[in-house]
Image (cartoon, grey):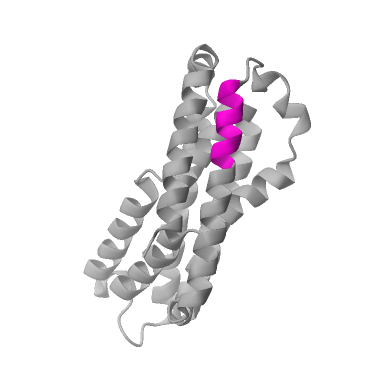
């Protein structure tokens, strides 16, 4: 408690940065919505868990100083950005194909899709997203002064991760409610078409990110 009070302004600043990052619409939110609506709650929660684990990976890396080291190697970040952008374009193609199809994917996806693949999809989306890397760098630099104790690091990282877990899982639960599914069934092709456009824009933005 003393550590929190000592660095309260920094803690609040770090939490606000994370809230803005995690609540702002992006590939993670779109992926959770797409999986929850198109494949049901189990897949929505699974992809949310993968995205959370991607966030946790960068949280640990940032806390250990690895993300700061990585940021010095432009080629590594460029490669990750290209892989992430191409993957988002692949998701855009899948969403477009679903929008063009007359078959309701809710009737066939649940049996065919693998939960492991869904989890890895979420993990890959967040692991290759430069926004996640730089968000955690900002969180650590804002929230932790030089010489911060391991307890202070744990307070910042664990607090942000708990917030992220709640938000990611909340999105999955929200988009997989019966009301959301009814809306999806009624306007599936329009929703999938919109997701295809958004995934395309996100992929192109990632590929042209500087």
Q: Image height check: is 112 above or below 133?
A: above
Query: Split into 4 quadrants, where in the image is the C terminus?
Result: bottom left
Query: Split into 4 quadrants, where in the image is the N terminus?
Result: bottom left
Q: Which residues are magenta?
A: 91-100
Residue 196 at what x, y percent from top left?
A: 50, 34
Res 142 quadrant in image:
bottom left
Residue lying furthest top in this view? 186
Query: Is residue 40 among what the camera can see?
Result: no
Residue lying furthest left in this view? 9
Residue 52 at what x, y percent from top left?
A: 54, 53
Q: Image height check: is 197 above or below 76?
A: above
Residue shown at 39% from the left, 60% from the top: 209
Left or right: where 21 falls relative to 207:
left
Residue 178 at what x, y percent from top left?
A: 54, 18
Left or right: where 158 falls relative to 53:
left
Magenta segment's dominant SS is: helix
Q: Image height check: is 62 above or below 32?
A: below
| Foreground pick, 162 / 17 | 17
Q: Is residue 98 magenta?
A: yes
| Foreground pick, 109 / 79 | 79
Residue shown at 46% from the left, 54% from the top: 162
Left or right: where 162 falls relative to 100:
left
Q: Image height check: is 132 above or below 45?
A: below
Query: Is residue 133 among what the camera can see?
Result: yes
Residue 28 at what x, y percent from top left?
A: 48, 46
Number of on-image labels: 0
Left or right: where 108 falls relative to 87:
right
Residue shown at 51% from the left, 54% from the top: 85
Residue lying furthest bottom in this view? 147
Res 108 quadrant in image:
top right
């Amino acid at each position: 408690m003393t550590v929190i009070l000592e660095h309260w302004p920094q803690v609040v600043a770090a939490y606000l940065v994370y809230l803005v990052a995690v609540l702002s619409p992006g590939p993670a939110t779109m992926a959770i919505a797409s999986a929850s609506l198109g494949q049901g709650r189990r897949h929505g929660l699974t992809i949310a868990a993968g995205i959370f684990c991607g966030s946790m990976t960068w949280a640990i890396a940032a806390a250990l100083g690895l993300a700061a080291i990585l940021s010095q190697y432009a080629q590594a970040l460029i490669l990750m950005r290209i892989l992430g952008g191409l993957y988002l374009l692949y998701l855009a193609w899948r969403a477009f194909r679903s929008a063009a199809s007359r078959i309701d994917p809710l009737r066939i996806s649940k049996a065919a899709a693998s939960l492991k693949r869904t989890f890895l999809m979420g993990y890959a989306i967040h692991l290759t997203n430069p926004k996640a890397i730089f968000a955690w760098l900002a969180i650590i630099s804002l929230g932790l002064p030089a010489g911060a104790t391991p307890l202070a690091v744990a307070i910042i990282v664990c607090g942000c991760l708990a917030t992220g877990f709640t938000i990611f899982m909340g999105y999955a639960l929200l988009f997989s409610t019966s009301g959301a599914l009814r809306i999806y069934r009624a306007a599936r092709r329009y929703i999938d078409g919109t997701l295809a456009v958004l995934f395309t824009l996100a992929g192109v933005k990632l590929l042209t990110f500087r």
